[in-house]
Structures are given as structure tokens and as C-alpha cells.
Amino acid sequence: MRANKTFSGGYHFKFEGYPRAEVVEMEIPSTVIIPLKQGCGNEVKPVVKQGDKVEAGQIIGKDAEGIAAPVHASVSGEVVSLDQIKYPRGVVNSIVIESDGTKRWEPLAGRQADWTKLSVPQIEELLYTSGVTSLDSQGIPTNREGSPLSARDVKHLIVNAVEADPYNLSLTVLLAEERLVQFLEGLMILQKMMPGAKIHLAVNSNRKELLAQFDELTRENQLLELYPLSPKYPQGNDEVLMKAILGGNYANASAASVVLTVQTVLQARDAVVDGKPLIERMVALSGPGWEHNLHLKVRVGTPIQSITAKYLKKTGLQRLVPNNLLTNVAISDLLPVDRTFDNLNAIPENTNRALFSFLRLGAKKSSYSKAFLSAALPMLEKTCDTNVHGEARACIFCGYCEEVCPVEIIPHLLDKYVKSNIIDEQLIRYGIFSCVECNLCSYVCPSKIHLAWNIKAGQQMLIENEFKQPQPAQCGKDAFAFHFAG
Ligand code: SF4
Ligand code: SF4
């Protein structure tokens, strides 16, 4: 086990509405809406038409030439329409299936309970046809045509098991009972496919029991290197995580590195051993907007409405945000759950003006400022809503944005340059392209300055002015947005 690693900066969140380690299997929905673009890769083409009968697990969309994994019917039933879905980032075609209500699904051909008997091409075929190669920011590399990175070229497989976002899918749920051993089996399968890769597993340093279990189970076969990391945001960000693991090698090794989540490794194992296509996700209902903060096992394509109808609080308006609460945009409940969902956050809308908020103490008010009572009571759960809790003011040069920034740039300085319209090499020298868009600087700013927005705007202006800085390709990276500040 490696020594506890960390990065300078960051922030520990403790918001009310953290998901409990309880799992409920959602009933089969009467209708599913399957987007033809889900996760990493291009939109695929439909291979079914209106009126066709489909089985859960059957491929209903694919693109054999482009970088894309097939999509499947997540329920058995009938294709009732080919439609379009309006996402905040654009329109995506979709297939609507009316379900027959049955739970059965069609296993993939070629699965093998004793996966060690499978050849590498057979494993790759199962992973590709299951759809799991589209998961996470880079997907799972294979040696097939159309994969952005060849599995043979991968030198570092980094598994992100850190729980450092405001809300996280629980490892206690994901790795319960036999799933811990199955997770290690998933890693062995991936290692067979990526023989040149060293496996690194990053886990919160406060997860002592889990760390001890991993240590005991892998000590003899030396399957992986274990990294206990400080659970502060944004440790789970791919770039921040890669830097923590690869250290001084980061610049050279990052292009041959892949970061996968625990849920992805488990779904890869299920595809190869059980022949299970990617038809369901474990999703944590996070935030104070839910009646119960539990984990839902839900079929892909389930309309969010059918989840909110059952589990959302009946009083007040709630904002729905998938996955990382600090970096993702709000979505409508007309959208379906897709392969990329880990969390569905529900945050109460609060539009009350909070004039001179910085003068009022509050034990449950999330604030980085030491002037607030909440800073002295870090273990107390803080209120979470959509209000910025204060009015915009001029920068008071407190330095908080600089203190928390995980990539050690100076957000208030970049912000000043951008606002003054000084868009030149200075911004590059001050590291504007190192920003990982975690939004933490905006979150902690007591003057409520949208630093991260302005930094992003500065990057865009530099690119438009042809001061282009190459960025690592991240096909699953979400749109930039910000919801609230403490
Ligand atoms: S958004 Fe960018 S500048 Fe702000 S804290 Fe995160 S990495 Fe630093
Ligand atoms: S946190 Fe806000 S007020 Fe403080 S230095 Fe940064 S921009 Fe200025």
C-alpha cells in the first residue's frame, strides 16, 4: 500500500441528503426512452423500426465504423417510436420502447463463467457488444478498430474509488458481499486485455476496513497497487487523480493512462462472466430534495419522471442535476436515466435574496470563510440548496480561491485579466489551461464571483484568437455549469 497521497487545496463537503447504503430495485418501467448517444463515443444508428418486437439486452443501435459502443433495449416489448431528446448540449435521437413488464434479459453469446478460458479477442467482443466500452471519460480501450486508445498501449489503469464529490455513489453498496471479489475478478479480466498496464486503485484514506480487505485479497497475487487518498474535492477528477497516482511521471504517462470507476469494472465483469449487457445502472438519489436518500437499481432509459413521482419530496420545487453537483447542468425530468448516471441530485430551489449574508453566522451554512460558525463545526451537515447565499461584490483578496485550487493556479488573477479583456500569452503563463473546471473557486468565493465561468470564457477567447493549447481528449466530459455557492 502506498503512503497517503494528496494534492494541495481542495475542500471537504458535508451536505445534508447524503445517500444511505440501502438499495431498492426499481420496477420495470412501462416505457423506456433509449438515447442513441450515451457516454463516450458517437451517436449510433438505429437497427430497429417502429413496431418491432425486442428483447431486453438486444442491440437496437450501433455504428460498426465509428468510435461508439452498441446500445440495447433495456426492457422487452415493442418499439413504439423513433424520437428525439433535447439535452442541454443538443438533440439526440432515441428509441422509445413500450415494455411488456417482464424482468428477463437476453444474455450475450460467448459469455463464460470461467473467463480464464476466453481469449483476448473473445473478451473484447463481449465488452464491446455489452456496451461497457462506452463508459467513463475515455471509455474502455480495446484492440478493436474504432477504439480511441489501443488496449495494448495502456500503461496505467487507474480505478477511481474515491468518494470526494459533494455526493457519491456508495462503495458500501457497490462492493457489498460477493461484489468485492467480483470487482477484483473484473480487474483481472481487464488486465488480461491490457497486459502492459499497471493497475492502481485509489480509495479514500478513511475507508480503513475496505483498504484492509483489498490489501489482504491482493497481497499475494500483486494484482494492484493501493492508494489511500484524502477524500477532498476534486480528488475524483480524472486529471487530479492521475497526478496523485502518477506523480512526476504524469506528463509522460497520462496519454497512456485510463481512469475507470468501480461501477464500470463491475459491469465489465458482468458482461464477460454473466453475459449481461449494459441495461441497468446503480444510481444514488442524493440531496435534500428526495424523500429518501437511497440507491436505486434502475433500467437504462427509465424516464426520470417515474423516479421523481415516487421518491421526490412533494413540497417545494427541486432542481435535478446528474452526477457531480458542482460541474453539471440541471436537467428536466422528461429525460431518461442513461448509462452515464451514478447520482441523481435533487436540490431545493431557493430564490430568496440573502442580502449581507456574509454578516450572518450560521452553523449549517456551508462556507469556506473562517468567520462563519459552520467552519468551526466541520462535522455538522450543511444546508444544500440552489441559492448563492449572498450578493456579488468586488474581490476582497482573501485568497480562498487560490487556496482551494487543486492545480495551483490563481483564479482571482486570471479572472481579473479576463474581465479586463487582456487575452494574451500572460493567461497561458498563469496556467489558464491547467484549470480542470472543478468550480471550487467559484464555490468558496465569499464575493460570489463566477471565477470558473470567467476562466472558461478566457480559455475560449484564447482559442478563438488562436492561442491554442492542446487539451487531453475527454469524450464524456460534461458541459460546464454552476448551480450554487456557499
Ligand atoms: S475551476 Fe479551475 S481555477 Fe477554479 S479551482 Fe477548479 S481548477 Fe482551479
Ligand atoms: S475567493 Fe473571491 S474574494 Fe477571495 S480572492 Fe478569490 S476572487 Fe477574490
Image: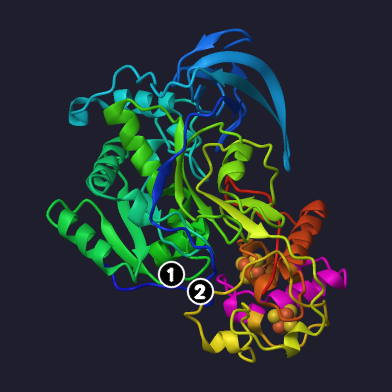
Quadrant containing ligand 2: bottom right
Magenta stretch encompasses residue 413: yes
Q: Residues within 10 Å of mark 1 (few under 14, many from 20)?
A: many
Name the image quarter holding residue 213: bottom left
Q: Give the label on residue 231, or none.
A: 1
> Where in the figure is residue 167, as x and y percent of width and height?
51, 60
> Where in the figure is residue 219, as x and y percent of width and height?
15, 58
Which residue in the rendered view is the most extreme toward the left?
A: 220
Reading the image, the residue beneath label 2 is: 12
**Quadrant placement of the C terminus:** bottom right
Is ligand 1 within 8 Å of the beta carbon of the residue shown at mark 1? no
For the point 41% across and 24% down, which residue is it? Answer: 103
Q: At numbered mark 1, what does the secondary structure look like: helix, strand or loop? A: loop
For the point 35% across and 62% down, which residue is it? Answer: 203
The amino acid beneath tag 2 is His
Tell me whether the residue at label 1 lies in contact with that at label 2, contact meaning CB atoms closer than 8 angstroms. yes
Any part of residue 179 in sight = yes
Against 295, residue 233 (above or below) is: below
Any part of residue 430 in sight = no
